């Protein structure tokens, strides 16, 4: 009975500290968004599936910098034109500490974060407007740690492309769902060495 109680206490302590170990200096974040909903601001909205792989390195506790790639296709209805999106660039994330600016840890298994990105990208609609130029976005998100090293994520972002083409600026609000894997530097080195 004592072993069972001790095991339960250790499990609760382990789960309560889960959201801190992953976002320490020297760790890696690999993952991305898989499903995205778009709400148009200056054009029609719709639903789409985008693949947005991301990779980042924690330069200090709670701060990660890295890169992203965005590839997407959107077709709202059967007769509507196909819309293609593409981008590549850099991103940054800042994870809010519990209690920081009134932010609380939801269920003690995750962290709120702010993410921003900037790069080169564009959008092209079949037989219609296109924009190519600077791809940018900013917004809040939440990572819920389903295991000590895997987070299920949701993020709401203002995203846009400004530059050249038929339309100078295209922008929208997106809601993205995906996951991230958090790897300590030693684990990352082991994976690279095993791949050689």
Image: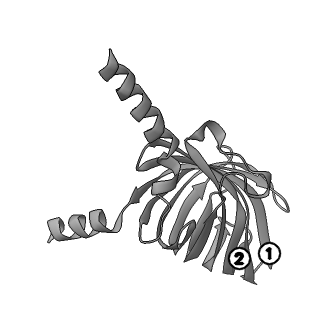
Residue at x 54%, y 66% (from the top left corner): 70
Left or right: residue 24 versus residue 160 is left
Residue 15 location (% of width, % of height): 47, 39
Camera-nearest label, 2 or 1 = 1
SS class of the residue under badge 2? strand
SS class of the residue under badge 1? strand
Q: Quadrant of the N terminus?
A: top left
Residue 110 location (% of width, % of height): 57, 46
Q: Is residue 167 visible?
A: no
Which of marks 1 and 2 precedes in the sequence? 2
Please tell me in which quadrant of the rendered image residue 147 appears: top left
Q: Residue furthest top?
A: 1
Q: Nearer the viewer, residue 21 or 7?
A: 7
Residue 24 location (% of width, % of height): 48, 64
From what the image shows, is residue 87 above or below residue 98? below
Q: Which mark is residue 122?
A: none
Q: Residues within 10 Å of mark 2 (few under 14, many from 20)?
A: many
Residue matched to label 2: 131
Q: Is residue 168 visible?
A: yes
Residue at x 77%, y 78% (from the top left corner): 166
Q: Residue furthest right?
A: 42
Please tell me in which quadrant of the rendered image residue 14 appears: top left
Please tell me in which quadrant of the rendered image residue 132 appears: bottom right
Say if mark 2 contacts mark 1, CB within 8 Å.
Answer: yes
Q: Residue furthest front?
A: 2
Q: Report how far apart the C-alphas of labels 2 and 1 lie in the structure.
A: 7 Å
Left or right: residue 100 versus residue 126 is right
Left or right: residue 159 versus residue 73 is right
Q: Quadrant of the C terminus?
A: bottom left
Q: Nearer the viewer, residue 58 or 131?
A: 58
Q: Which mark is residue 169?
A: 1
Q: Nearer the viewer, residue 155 or 75?
A: 155
């Amino acid at each position: 009975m004592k072993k069972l109680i001790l095991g339960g206490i250790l499990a609760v302590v382990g789960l309560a500290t889960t959201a801190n170990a992953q976002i320490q200096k020297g760790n890696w974040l690999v993952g991305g968004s898989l499903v995205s909903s778009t709400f148009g601001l200056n054009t029609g909205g719709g639903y789409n599936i985008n693949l947005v792989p991301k990779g980042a390195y924690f330069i200090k506790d709670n701060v990660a910098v890295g890169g992203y790639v965005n590839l997407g296709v959107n077709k709202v209805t059967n007769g509507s034109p196909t819309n293609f999106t593409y981008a590549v660039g850099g991103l940054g994330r800042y994870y809010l500490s519990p209690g920081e600016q009134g932010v609380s840890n939801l269920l003690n298994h995750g962290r709120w974060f702010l993410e921003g990105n900037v790069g080169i990208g564009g959008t092209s609609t079949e037989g219609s407007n296109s924009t190519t130029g600077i791809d940018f976005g900013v917004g809040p998100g939440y990572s819920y740690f389903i295991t000590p090293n895997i987070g299920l994520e949701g993020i709401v972002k203002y995203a846009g492309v400004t530059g050249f083409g038929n339309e100078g600026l295209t922008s929208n609000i997106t809601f993205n769902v995906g996951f991230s894997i958090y790897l300590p530097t030693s684990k990352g080195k082991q994976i690279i060495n095993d791949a050689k």
